[in-house]
Amino acid sequence: MSDFLWYIPNQAVAGHRGDSVSEDHNSLDTLTTQAQALEEHGWSGALVGAGWGRPDTFTVAAALAARTTSFEPLIAIRPGYWQPAQFASAAATLDHLSNGRVRVNIVSGKDNLAAYGDSEGDPAHRYARTREFMRLVRRLWAEENVTFEGEYFRVAGSSPAPRLQKHPKLYFGGASEAAEQVAATEADVQLFWGEPLDGVRERIERLRGLSKTLDRDLPPLEFGLRITTLVRDTTEQAWADAEAKVAEMAKSSAIWDDHKQAAAVGQKRLLDLQARGDVLDDNLYTAPAKYGAAGAGTTWLVGSARDVARSLKKYEELGIRYFILSDTPYLAESKRQGETLLPLMKE
């Protein structure tokens, strides 16, 4: 059965991607309200994003886990910001205290590394370090007295506590050749942005082939989709609201321009979709990219709950099992889509 998560913003500035602006947007009460609403409306949990300049992601996730009972945080973390043994212990502790509710999203994209004392080389260097990090963290969760001397990390006689019977899933994203090699060998779940069906199909086939070529020694790689879903009562209302939202973005695109660095390979793939048209497949809306949208906000699935469910089921048929959806305002839309979209997906 497929698995459905939402997104909880932990941002320094209120109003992320058109969210409701509130002075207490990062208070524990506000974030807890969002996490508890997800529990009540059928979501497994939520992605909590990472990036220097935001509140610390792991701390936010730990606080929300303590205030909920079934909510599963997908915690975005970066090698370099974390050392492998330090992270392995922190994640094992939270997983133990939350009764196995931790998921981990390994992020290798650009960040303000110098601000927290980190440095990286070219993409090949960055992904080689990520691969070593993921492999070592798995060993630290599974083995006692780990000694490892790698190119980027080293430990001696390391046994993080508490010990785990089953380690958290490692989610991973990236579309470059170096990133796909990491996914094929080290990830549990490869996440895709909202590409058309043909692009997702092609990448799944390639990653499955790479897993065989590179002698993957883990269970088969699984796949997930991170995308914006704009759902309304009718198809006509959804498209009217989507076009109105893009018109507003055109007036004030600065608030949406949240990926100011040079586009990564996966982001460039999304931006290049504009050349194919404003609407691809049945209802994949690419126009937001014209006005500063990035990441999961670059493309939107638009329509009634039945329209969007039909499109998501086509991704399911390709092999997508994990869905991370969102729209703004985050709280209201998590309730709307939990009541209208999720029941159709779970039929």
Image: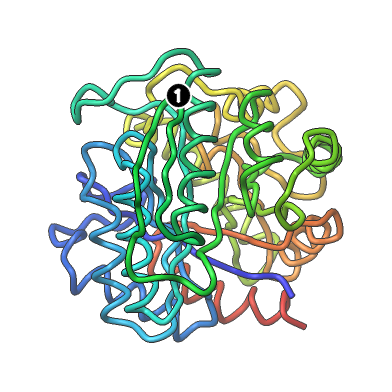
Question: What's the residue at 41%, 70% (across, down)?
Answer: 163
Q: Which residue is mark 1?
A: 151
**Side (left or right) of 327 relative to 202:** left
**Closer to us: 71 or 158:** 158
Q: Name, please, the residue furthest toward the left.
A: 23
> Could you tell me residue 291's position as x and y percent?
48, 28
> Could you tell me residue 321's position as x and y percent?
72, 63
Question: Tag 1, which secondary structure?
Answer: loop
**Closer to us: 199 or 135:** 135
Corner quadrant of residue 174: top right
**Closer to us: 279 or 298:** 298
Question: What's the residue at 53%, 23% (across, down)?
Answer: 264
Question: What's the residue at 62%, 44% (across, down)?
Answer: 186
Given the image, on which type of amino acid does mark 1 rest? Glu
> Could you tell me residue 158's position as x and y percent?
35, 52
Q: Is residue 162 above or below residue 52?
A: below
**Side (left or right) of 11 relative to 18:** left
**Closer to us: 213 or 295:** 213
Q: Is residue 17 above or below residue 8?
A: above
Question: What's the residue at 47%, 24% (across, down)?
Answer: 126
Where's the C terminus, which quadrant?
bottom right
Q: How is the image coloured?
A: rainbow
Q: Is residue 286 above or below residue 237?
A: above
Looking at the rendered structure, the number of numbered marks drawn on it comes to: 1
Corner quadrant of residue 252: top left
Corner quadrant of residue 324: bottom right
Where's the N terminus, which quadrant?
bottom right
Mark 1 neighbour density, 10 Å: few (under 14) some (14–19) many (20 or more): few
Q: Is residue 287 above or below residue 157?
A: above
> Could you tell me residue 318's position as x and y percent?
85, 53
